[in-house]
Amino acid sequence: MNIAIGADHAGFTLKESVKNLLLSLGHHVDDFGTDSAERSVDYPDIAIPVAEAVASGTYDRGILLCGTGIGMSIAANKVKGAYTALCHGVFEAQASRKHNNANILALGGRILGEEIACQIVTAWLSTSFEGERHLRRTRSIQHYERRNTPEHPVPGVETGRFIVVDHPLIQHKVAIIRDKRTSVKEFRELVQEIAGLMVYETTRDLPLEETCVETPLERTVVKTLSGKKLAVVPVLRAGLGMVDGILRLVPNAKVGHIGLYRDPETLEPVEYYCKLPGDIQERDIYILDPMLATGGSASAAIDLVKRKGARKISLVCLIAAPEGVAKVRERHPEVDIFTAALDKHLNDHGYIVPGLGDAGDRLFGTK
Ligand code: RB5
């Protein structure tokens, strides 16, 4: 295995012993420091580079040591994709692999003797993740990380925002539309309501200008929208279900339409209809598609409006899969993505899980 190891001054001595063990077991080891027990170093300065190197996949595992192991585990676990287990015995070390799929081991140099530390490390490295019920739990942690950790910006490219609009009212309504027993009528109404509630977030940055009004008491300065032009562009057909909810709040927005179907041979989205406002380059464009699944049609819709001259584009969906978010991010990194929920994954048929099924069929009662 490729192993990254690091320690502060209080973990240095034990690190040297663990390193020798790893080399004797035939592992490749890179030492991220420190190189002395005398000179004080701050554990986050070691923990974070090791955790980032493991989380990025450069190393299979990491081992971190400080006086107690506590500071190292706290700091390393701030890194998305780092799952650090602080262990004092062989049982914990094995469980941290079997149940938690820990990819970093934290040890306390002032707590453990060399012999037990080596037993812990040996057991930890030779124990596999058991998956099954534990997978649900580790995925749940990853789900939380994806929702709450901002993406690293790509140098030189403006990075759009990825926002899960998870206001309690929205979560409540999303819960109802997920339920397969929800009627077409109720589903349709709720989709419009959720899309409307999301407008508060999607339009948060609209520019304002100051003006004056006479209240019944005095003249005062107020702020009004500075006349920014908007357009909503539903992707047919499911995107239509979101339009009215948005127009209720921004009644002057223009509406464009994009129709795409999936070529049965290439599986690529193909345009069959596109009618956009003539002044699209002057408008903030909100592409509407309730389900961001593979990201194929969303990316194609964004391509299309870009080709027609659109400059400021956001994608608004209700439920997104990580695969779809990643695809849109990769193809259109500058586009803001808003969703009411970020789900776990796509199944083999390209449906979002847990999702809500086919949004078009549920909106129009066509199943
Ligand atoms: C350093 O004295 C000590 O605080 C550090 O090694 C570690 O135990 C922190 O968690």
Image (cartoon, rainbow, N blue to C red):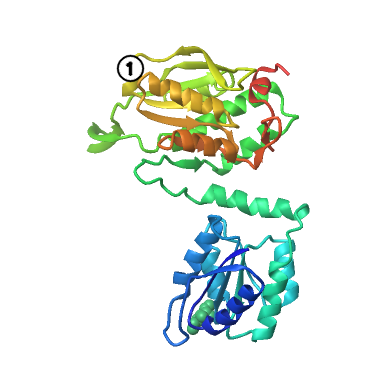
Taking the spot 44% from the left edge, 76% from the top edge, the residue there is 42
Q: Which image quadrant for residue 200?
A: top left
Residue 252 seen from this side: no
Residue 170 picture location, percent across and down: 57, 38
Residue 95 picture location, percent across and down: 74, 67
Q: Nearer the viewer, residue 268 or 314?
A: 268
Q: Which image quadrant for residue 119?
A: bottom right
Residue 333 picture location, percent across and down: 43, 37
The number of numbered badges drawn on the structure is 1
Residue behind mark 1:
279
Q: Nearer the viewer, residue 312 or 80?
A: 80
Callout 1 environment at 10 Å: few (<14), some (14 to 19), or many (20+)?
few
Q: Quadrant of the N terminus?
A: bottom right
Q: Nearer the viewer, residue 66 or 142?
A: 66
Q: Quadrant of the C terminus?
A: top right
Left or right of 189 in this view: 302: left
Taking the spot 62% from the left edge, 85% from the top edge, the residue there is 111
Residue 281 seen from this side: yes
Taking the spot 24% from the left edge, 32% from the top edge, the residue there is 214
Give the SS element for disc 1: loop
Which amino acid, by three-letter code, is at mark 1?
A: Asp
Left or right of 334 in this view: 223: left
